Amino acid sequence: MPDDGARTASTLEEIPPAERTPIAGVKEALQRRWSRPGGRGYAGLRWGGAGLFTAVAVALVVSLLTSSSQAFAHSGLSLLWTGTWDPTHKIYGAETFIVGTLITTAVALVLAVPIGVATAAFLSELAPRWLATPLSVLIDLIAAVPSIVVGLWGLLVLTPAFAHHVEPFLKKIPVLEWFFHGPALGPSMLLAGVVLAVMILPTMVALSRTALAGVALTDREAARALGGTRWQVVRRAVIPGARTGIEGAVTLAMGRALGESIAVAMVIGNAYVIPHSLLAPGATLGSAIINNFGGVTPGLDRSEVIALVVILLALTALVNAGGQLLLRSRAREQVS
Amino acid sequence: MSPVATTTGLGTGSPGDGGAGLGEGAARRRELILAQSKRSLGRRHLAGRVAVALCMVAVAISLAPLVALVAYTTSRGVHALSVDFFTKIPTPAGIAGGGISNAIVGSLIIVGLAAVMAVPVGIATALFLLERRGRIAGTIRFTADVLTGVPSIALGIFAYTVLVEPFAHFSAIAGSFALAVLMLPVIIRSSEAAMRNVPRSEWEAGLALGVRRGRVVRSIVLRGALPGLVTGNLLAVARAVGETAPLLFTTGSQLFNLNPAQPTAAVPLTIFSLGTSPFPADQQTAWGAAFVLLVFVLVLSIVARLVAGRLNRQAR
């Protein structure tokens, strides 16, 4: 719908009064309808909405950048690879938090991606309809559980369970013990990763399911006609066909895991050292922001914390833009 | 993903070359091929069954923690509920009793204001995207998609720098603003999708009658897309009401307050502060608040889906 009230209004004045034939009169009447306040108001509404939205998005970036400029002037980019966070000595480094963010996200993805894709494959391809529909609705609903509730559960239920049962058990497994050494305290990178996995699983399942369902029927039929069993069709035709969509799903889930702050802050233990074991407590960008912003003094200290926000924002924006582009390229593939 | 990749290729199972009366050698070959293919099919069916079983285990693993979480929150939270819980404000740390009326009222104010800010702007932007193609619309759409993934804590700090720092105190409005920014991209994309479902012929019918464009949008497009709009916006509200990080540095207080320009309590903040407290009485209240929040969010999501279901039935 390309038309636009304001543009037609200007053409009205271009008709000289002397040339007004009956047809021009009708035209004029029609054009007047367009140029009446309603028409213009509607154009204003659309532009106003889009303008406001754009302004907010720009303001978000600009305000965070200006509030953190002092920090970047003080630490420069070395903020990224300094491992100490010591406001009393004016030493600020985000490395611990960046490493923590990447490790917890990796743990979450290692858990959530295979389970999520398998669940999606079952719901979309293998399960009978009477089972797939209610389970899908259940997973969609559960995706709405607020992160603070997941965090509370992680803090009060999972933390003691991990300290007394899960972590001592993991330490006994022969090969994995390399990842799981040190005391079993409960709050740890591992627990944070598990909590994140629980939170991103519904996203993973929902987006992968959409991707799998989008694979063309002819692809399935071709694989079936070659003598593939039901599972072989899924494994060799459907999942490869949905690859870009699944990659998009993984990237968006990763974005969520990178950016989650409150639930992680409740279970990660908030230790500001680079962890050498998954059982060690640590900190992520999100949890460090939450724990430091509250009591921070205005000036350099606060600016440094906002610099952490900027790093987090850049990280997630990058990942999300990548995910969106992947999902779009899939949409284009399907159109063509 | 699974240990089934060892199965033979797709083609090996095809039955033999169907030559009856080709002599003894051919018959034996046929027999061999048949036996081979039967074995292959059996193997592949077995592999398939194992894989399906593994997928079912995956389904169980994905559902178990979330179902356990909801069940546990319900069993703990129900005990905290009482009339006092909904009518009183919290007691000092560690003392049993008290309620979260301040937080419930505060959350309703904050989320209500956020919706008032975000819904009109969101729908107007969706209309913009609907009526325009080209670079501007593409950029806005992409911005909305990327903004969906912005960490909520970043929105909280943004609202802090814009609306808290200049006034030197927390306020419900600052929290609402953060939540509105959180909801906007969701509202924009879902509203656009809902309104795109209104058939083009209906737009054109309206325009052909000489109805002004604004009127067409109001009476035909918005009305036709109403169920979809309600669904999308309710889901956005459901997402916003449980958010903690955007409110942490924008609204916080423990007082009962109705003035949006003043510090206000909110349910997620109450859960955070009471849940991290060492006192069992506080934790009990936190479970109660978590249960109330959970029920509210789930009811909103279910209502949103019912509305969407009605839309689908109407369309059919």
Image (spheres, coloured by chain):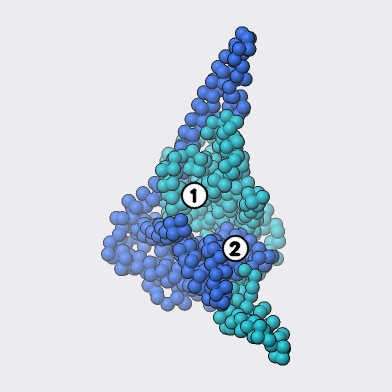
Chain colours: A cyan, B blue
Q: With A313 as the anchor, is B251 left or right in this view?
A: left
Q: In the image, what residue occupies the spot 56% across and 56% down?
A: A259
Judged from this view, the residue extending furthest toward the bottom is A18
Q: Are marks 2 and 1 on the same chain?
A: no
| Circle 2: residue type | Ala
Q: Mark 1 points at which residue?
A: A202
Q: Is residue A89 left or right of residue A157?
A: right
Image spot of residue A126 (x, y percent): 49, 38
Q: Mark 1 lies on which chain?
A: A
How far across and how far down the image is residue B291, in percent? 36, 57
User: Quick one: A8 or B106, which is closer to the camera?
Assistant: A8
Circle 2 residue: B144
- Please, which residue is most extreme toward the left here? B83
Query: Where is residue B234 drawn, in percent x and y?
Result: 45, 63
Tell me which chain the residue with mark 2 is part of.
B
Helix, strand or loop at disc 1? helix
Residue A55: x and y in percent read: 62, 72
Classed neighbour count for the residue bearing mark 2: other residues with Cα under 10 Å, few (<14), some (14–19), many (≥20): many
- Contact, mark 2 vs mark 1 (Cβ under 8 Å): no
Residue sitting at x 54%, y 20%: B39
The answer to which of B277 and B242 lies nearer the viewer is B242
Q: Quadrant of the N terminus of chain A?
A: bottom right
